């Protein structure tokens, strides 16, 4: 581990420790601790303090919109290149609306795909992109 990495790790640890000690727990997403005097006394006659947990707002991920939920639930992978719609093709990694449209147009021009490797003939799909989506698509006559 480099010296810089050690310094950053040490500094981060100190900041987190200071946040906990000073009660700035909203920085690390933990409930805040509040000191309250409950009126009980210790053997030496001084009031003792107790710590109470107070609630903090829930931190949740934003909800998915209905289109994303439908795509996540309905779309089975791998996709059949000969029957996939443009919208389904857009969900593949690295395939946007323009490239998906090119795939559909190419399929309309040549007829059904006979091999996944034919995707390389679509303008904009190279070896890297083909390798990235190869496991997510198949060809069925």
Image: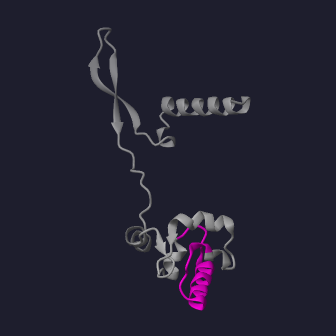
Among the 4 quarters of the image, the one containing residue 99: bottom right
87 relative position to 131: left or right: left
11 relative position to 88: left or right: right
Identify the residue at horizontal 55%, vertical 30% (top origin): 18
x and y percentages locating residue 57 in the rendered image:
39, 50
Q: Nearer the viewer, residue 80 or 8?
A: 80
Magenta run includes residue 136? no
Q: Residue furthest top?
A: 44
Give the vertical position of 20 relative to 48 (above or below): below
User: Which quadrant, please, contains the N terminus?
Assistant: top right
x and y percentages locating residue 105 in the rendered image:
59, 88
x and y percentages locating residue 117 in the rendered image:
61, 72
x and y percentages locating residue 34 in the rendered image:
39, 33
Identify the residue at horizontal 41%, vertical 54% (top origin): 60
Q: Nearer the viewer, residue 114 or 45?
A: 114
Magenta run includes residue 107? yes
Instruction: Find the magenta span and give its range.
Output: 92-117
Give the vertical position of 103 relative to 93 (above or below): below
Give the vertical position of 16 relative to 78 (above or below): above
């Amino acid at each position: 581990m480099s010296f810089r990495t050690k310094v950053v790790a040490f500094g981060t640890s100190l900041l987190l420790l200071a946040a906990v000690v000073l009660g700035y727990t909203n920085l690390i997403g933990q409930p805040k601790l509040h000191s309250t005097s409950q009126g009980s006394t210790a053997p030496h006659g001084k009031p003792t303090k107790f710590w109470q947990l107070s609630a903090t707002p829930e931190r949740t991920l934003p909800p998915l919109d209905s289109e994303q939920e439908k795509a996540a639930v309905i779309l089975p992978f791998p996709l059949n290149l000969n029957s996939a719609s443009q919208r389904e093709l857009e969900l593949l990694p690295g395939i946007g609306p323009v490239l998906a449209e090119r795939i559909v147009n190419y399929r309309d021009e040549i007829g059904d795909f006979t091999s996944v490797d034919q995707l390389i003939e679509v303008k904009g799909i190279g070896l890297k992109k083909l390798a990235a989506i190869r496991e997510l698509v198949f060809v069925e006559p």
